[in-house]
Image (spheres, helix red, strand yellow):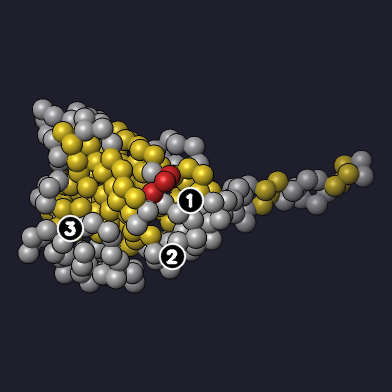
Amino acid sequence: MGAGDDTGGHDDAASDTLPVIDTAVIPGDDALPGDGGGTVDGSGTTDGGGATDGGIADAVVITDAPTGPLTGGPCASGHAGVTAYRIRWAGNGAGSTAYPVYEKNGLPDHSRDHAGAFGYQIGFTPRWDDPFLGDGGLVLDGSDFVDLELTTVGLATISNATLSIRGRSFNTTSPGGFSWQTFDGSGATPSMFVSNSAPYQWYSADMTTEISPGDNHVLVRIKAAGGSGSLIVNRIELCFTAT
């Protein structure tokens, strides 16, 4: 599927081969540096002061302690589980170049951490738009797709995986949908799943069977699909229940 040069030390997708995939032309600089490693600090403690009361020592209270191998904190989409990965699409005004801001990587292994929007035509540039009806985001339509590159090494099981997109259908008269594909399989939402009205909302779909634990070469490809075939994507989140 070919991938262009990326920045910020993230792995490139050029070596990935999906079973049935489109040929894409990648912009020379598909991502700007972002924060790819946000984690929840699990070391915070509150000291009871070491004093004793009636011969019983004060208790030490542990705060923000992770409950498993994932450290991304609560899911912004509202789902149960822990944030495994989340990005936001930023830009500098309507029609400007869209680039990913890495908000959370709660996975145990951060060695593979890259997101980008890629097109099918020479000269493609990811486009940011819709600053008036919401926060704005990436225009995802028939001209492009999003790839998330990550690793699930360090996870023994994934009992639930949810893919969520925040945004709206970029069409004032028709809702839309989205699809996804990995090396483990593919899936799609109903065609009229994503509302075309403001404000932006989270739209979530189960992708548990399309992602495996202990995989050091995960690639999640996301496309607009169904209905309008055009979306504004403000954020993308992967939420896992895992051990």
Query: Which residue position holds label 3?
Result: 22
In the image, 87: left or right of 138?
right
Mark yes or no: residue 228 visible.
Answer: yes
Query: Which residue position holds label 1?
Result: 72
Q: Label 1 amino acid?
A: Gly
Cα–Cα gap, marks 1 and 3: 32 Å
Q: Label 3 amino acid?
A: Asp
Q: Label 2 amino acid?
A: Asn
Residue at x-position 14% and y-position 58%:
119
Q: Nearer the viewer, residue 89 or 216?
A: 216
In the image, 68: left or right of 185?
right
Query: Which residue position holds label 2?
Result: 216
Q: Secondary structure at mark 2?
A: loop
Question: Would you identify the image quadrant in which residue 17 lies?
Answer: bottom left
Residue at x-position 10% and y-position 27%:
173
Q: Secondary structure at mark 3?
A: loop
Task: Name the mark nearer the viewer: 1 or 3.
Answer: 3
Residue at x-position 43% and y-position 56%:
105
Mark yes or no: residue 132 visible.
Answer: no
Say whether disc 1 or disc 3 marks the residue closer to the N-terminus: 3
Cα–Cα gap, marks 3 and 2: 22 Å
Question: Would you identify the image quadrant in which residue 218 lies?
Answer: bottom left
